[in-house]
Amino acid sequence: MNFASIHFFIFFTFVLLVYWNLPRTKQNIFLLLASWFFYAFWDWRFLSLIVISTLSNYYCGKLIFANNKNSSRRFWLIVAIVVNIGILVYFKYAGFMVDSLMLMFEKAGISVSRVTLEITLPVGISFYIFQSLSYSLDIYRNKLTPNYSLIDFATFVAFFPQLVAGPIVRATEFLYQLESERKFNSSDFEQGAIRFLSGFFKKVFIADNLAVHLVDPVFSNPGSYSSGILWFAMLGYSVQIYADFSGYSNMAIGCARMLGFKLPENFNFPYLATNFSDFWQRWHMTMSRFFRDYIYISMGGNRRGQIRTLVNLAVTTLVSGLWHGASWTFVAWGGLHGLYIALNHQLNEHIQKLNVAFALIFGWLSTQLLVCFAWILFRSPNFESAIEFFRGLFSAQTGTTIYLPVILYLCIASFIVDHVYGLCCEQFPVLRENNFNKILPFVYATMLIMLFHGQVEEANPFIYFQF
């Protein structure tokens, strides 16, 4: 059920009307049933995976907490990890591993029968597996005590606003909200509706128009377009994926707010970043902190010397790349960001010796350009297509120069306004209270008009639904 569809509007309106007329205990039961229905709307068969993940982490969490012996605690944590990661590996990576193995045999000259696994990828599986698994991990690390209401825990895992594409919420951030009394608050509802509108605009107006009119046709056949169009498509995809994913996050946060919940922020104007560490503190922040806390820090972080720190960074970013998709292009994308961060660490001292203004400008330009280059790997279906795209960028390639409608320039302008607003809020926070709020009604009215005239005929699926 796409957030940008009429089906979701009907569903969410029904949920709001019923939910706010129920007592707290029944609110949680209703939210659980609504969330399961929301997920089953895609494919009811995969609802069983959410139930398995829920039950395994709920009972393993209780057993981890109940045992004083480290060996027993570790055993039940391993059970939770094996069950959940086993589900993820089978549905998301089994076909990828078999294809990679077949290719390796072919390269080695070994004749084998071709095996193809036809496994449907459940939508959002990476998000709810990681979210539910963090519960067992936090109990094991003595950062959380078990929740003894199975209904509340199941609602935490399946909560529909962020179920299929995040933000990745931890139990410490959400379970206490389920236990609290919630009453309708007009201010929360208004803020949630505005947040949903901003996300809807990013997705439907900016992301979908860029995809339809520029990104999809160019990336499908990069060898047919001129170098100038390739550069524009690369920048267009950088804006598209930001608008698409941050748009979803805004809609999820907005829906939750209208239901009386607060979810963690997932984006903080990432294209303002002046170095790669800064970029990952602004982009998909809930995923970044998950990998930081459960992989990078668990491996030693930066506490075991420079070489080990770089190794930990490399492993973390490679795993992050593989989490995004079962393809070597995603692994390469993660590895490239690992290289970026490692170089950033090595060059940071030298950069700080430069003139402050020059260092900021150089840091911002180099960071954003290299991030855009990495997005080519992320978007391309295979290495051959990515290499063809890179070759076209730097070879003064001639080819088709497609017509770029005015709406694309409005999309780019909207993105720039979004980040200029973010920059002003960061540098001059007082302006947000004194001036920006006065023009917000005009901004929202403009967004509605642009949506009315600029919505594509059929909304594209959210990019991160495939992860």
Image (cartoon, rainbow, N blue to C red):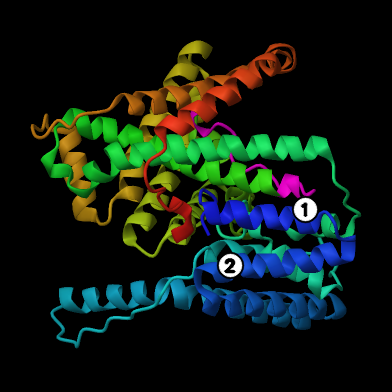
- Residue segment shown in magenta: 256-272
Q: Amino acid type of disc 2?
A: Tyr
Dot 1 corresponds to which residue? 173
Secondary structure mostly seen in the magenta stretch: loop
Q: Nearer the viewer, mark 2 or mark 1?
A: 2
Identify the residue at image location x=8%, y=32%.
398
* Residue 114: % across, % down: 21, 84
- Could you say which is closer to the camera, residue 302 or residue 408? 408
Residue 100 as seen in the image, left or right of residue 294: left
Q: Are marks 2 and 1 in contact (CB under 8 Å)?
A: no
Identify the residue at image location x=61%, y=60%.
163
Which residue appears farthest toward the bottom when viewing the image?
113
| Residue 66 magenta-highlighted | no
2 or 1: tag closer to the N-terminus? 2
Q: Quadrant of residue 142?
A: bottom right
The 10 Å Cα crowd at callout 2, few under 14, some 14 to 19, many 20 or more, is many
* Residue 68: % across, % down: 86, 79
Residue 69 as seen in the image, left or right of residue 327: right
* Residue 199: % across, % down: 56, 39
- Could you say which is closer to the camera, residue 144 or residue 189? 189
Question: Would you place residue 324 above or below residue 429 in this image?
Answer: below
Question: Would you place residue 154 above or below residue 4 in this image?
Answer: below
Dot 2 corresponds to which residue? 39
- CA gap, disc 2 to disc 1? 22 Å
Question: Would you place residue 405 above or below residue 12 in this image?
Answer: above
The 10 Å Cα crowd at callout 1, few under 14, some 14 to 19, many 20 or more, is few
Is residue 166 visible in the rendered image? The answer is: no
Q: Secondary structure at mark 2?
A: helix
- Could you say which is closer to the camera, residue 124 or residue 281? 124
Identify the residue at image location x=76%, y=60%.
171
